[in-house]
Structure formats: C-alpha cells, structure tokens
Image (cartoon, rainbow, N blue to C red):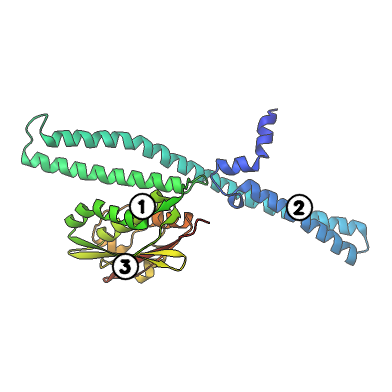
Amino acid sequence: MNFKNIFAQFNILANCRKYNLSPWQCPQFLFLMMGLIIIGSSLLAFALGNRYFEDPAMVALMVILITAILFIISFTITNSFERLAEASRMKTEFINIVSHQLRAPLTSLSWSIELLISGKLGRIEGKQIEYFKIIKENSNRMKELISDLLTVSRIETVNFSIKKEDVSLENIIEELILKSDSFAKASNVEIEFKKKADLPKIFTDPSCVRQAIESLLDNAIRYIKDKGKVVMSLEKKGKSLYFEIKDNGVGIPKEEQKYIFQKFFRSENILRYQTQGSGLSLYIAKSIIEKIGGKIDFKSQEGIGSTFWFILPISKK
C-alpha cells in the first residue's frame, strides 16, 4: 500500500493547484464542504427527531437515511466536478504542448520565406514572390493564433502572474499607436488619441494593460471596412482612469452582443466580410482587465460601429 499516494489525496490545496482551480471550484474542497454540510444536517435531523419522535430507533433511522442520501448526492456532484476539472486540465496541457511545438517550426518557416523573398538564394520571379507572400501571410496568422492560445492558457491558470508597478497609461497608448501605424495605414484607418492633461499614473501590470489595449485596438482597426477612424480617449474619473476606444466599423448585431466576450466567438456579420481573426482577442482583453482589478464593457450598433471602454483603479491598494 502506497501511503504517500493516500495522503496526497487528502492534500486539498495540492489537488486544487493540480487542476489550476481556486478552492471554491476544486472538487476535493467542495467535497469537504459538502461533508461539513452533511454533518450539520445530520445533527439537525437528530435534534428534530428527538423533539418529534419518541422512539430512539426511528430517530436513528431518520438520521442515517438523511445522511446516506446527502452523502450519495455529494459524492455524485463532486465526482462529476472532478471529471470536468480533469478534462479541463488535459485540454489546457494539450493546447500548451501543441502551441509550443508549433511555434518553433513556424518561426523557422518565416525566416526561410524571408530569405527566399530576399533573392539571396537565387532569382525569384514575380509570380513566385506573390505565392511566397501568401505563405508568409498565412504563417503570420498561425503565429498570432498560437500566441493567443498560449495567452488564454496562461490567463486561465490560478498562478497567473501579475507584477504591479507605477504605469503611465498615456505612454502605453502612444506606443501602441506607433506600433499599429503601418497596419492602420494599410487598412485605410486613421487613429486619433484624445487625452486629458496631467493624468496620474496607475499601479498595475504594464504588460497586462498593454496586451488588453492592443487587443482592443487591433479589433477596432480590423473590423473597419473601407475608410474609417478609430478614436481613443483617456481621462480621470474619480479614483480611476477611464479608457475608451471607438470605431466606425461593422458593429455587432444586438442579438449577438451577449456572446461577445466568449472564447472563439465571431459574429455573423464579421464572417460575411471574411475578416481574419481567432475570436480570442476580446476574451483576452476582458480576462486581463478583470484580473488586474478593472471593469470592461461596450456598446455597439450594427453598421454604425462599436465603443469599448474600461476603468482601472489608480490606488496602490
């Protein structure tokens, strides 16, 4: 008999970490809570039985029956939760392994394509360059998808790392505008940034904020058809900073707006335009903002455009 494995089953915190779940989502912890509820229910049944039944055997039978029913229900529920948690853990591990394994060959493929297009290995004809550019574009799309999958996997772990420091949200936005300049020009989109004077710094994780804003900005540019404009604004509201990004893109149908922050969701009007995307960017933005203590929401009208906004606390507490 392996006592180490037996004792490991009773290590609730270790099992919760195994499934990357908080205690209130962990099957073992829930089973413990249900056990305490069963004990409390049994004691209550005993007290009520003593009050309303004179026969001790009847009281004992009632307590045993109630305890057995509650135990069976508890075991069934926690066992189901454990199977779901194990399936979720295996899914996350699979995504991590596949994504990491795909990243290296895709990077190598991109370098090879760049080298071939440059002509250093020999002359490349016009039609060949065109096909190489198509391969390069699809390779970049796959790299973006892999990056998003790895980000989602990292966000969904209990040990998601947040490193807070004093951050200038204004500087981050300006950096991202410069970074997105070529993409915006290629999409025939103008970017405008409106900011209030003397904005304070906020105490948060700069990489998280940068990724959330980048996801929102990329979405705003991507879903504008023909010529368009993206307007970002930043101001102080009470003890928080308020960020808003507005576009005049295709918008989101009213009946589909409740799904917009779900993983892999893409509205039907977007699919009609054949716009590339993984359906993960808004899920990532929402998850990150909420993990660093903020709140995010949006309003949208199909054919008019969308406005996404979030608030982040300024305080270090």
Q: Nearer the viewer, mark 2 or mark 3?
A: 3
Residue 29: x %, y % from top left: 65, 48
57 relative position to 84: left or right: right
Instruction: State the residue at coordinates (47%, 54%).
Output: 292
Instruction: State the residue at coordinates (30%, 58%).
Output: 217
Instruction: State the residue at coordinates (66%, 38%).
Output: 9
Q: Which residue is mark 3?
A: 306
162 relative position to 221: left or right: right
The amino acid type of the residue labelled 3 equals Ser
How many residues crowd mark 1 within 10 Å: few (<14), some (14–19), many (20+)?
A: some
Q: Which residue is mark 1?
A: 210
Of labels 1 and 2, earlier in sequence is 2
Q: Which residue is mark 2?
A: 68
Residue 95: x %, y % from top left: 41, 42
The amino acid type of the residue labelled 2 equals Ala
Give the camera-side residue of 165 and 147. 165
Classify residue 59 by image quadrant.
bottom right
**Whether residue 98 is situated above or below residue 195 in the rendered picture:** above
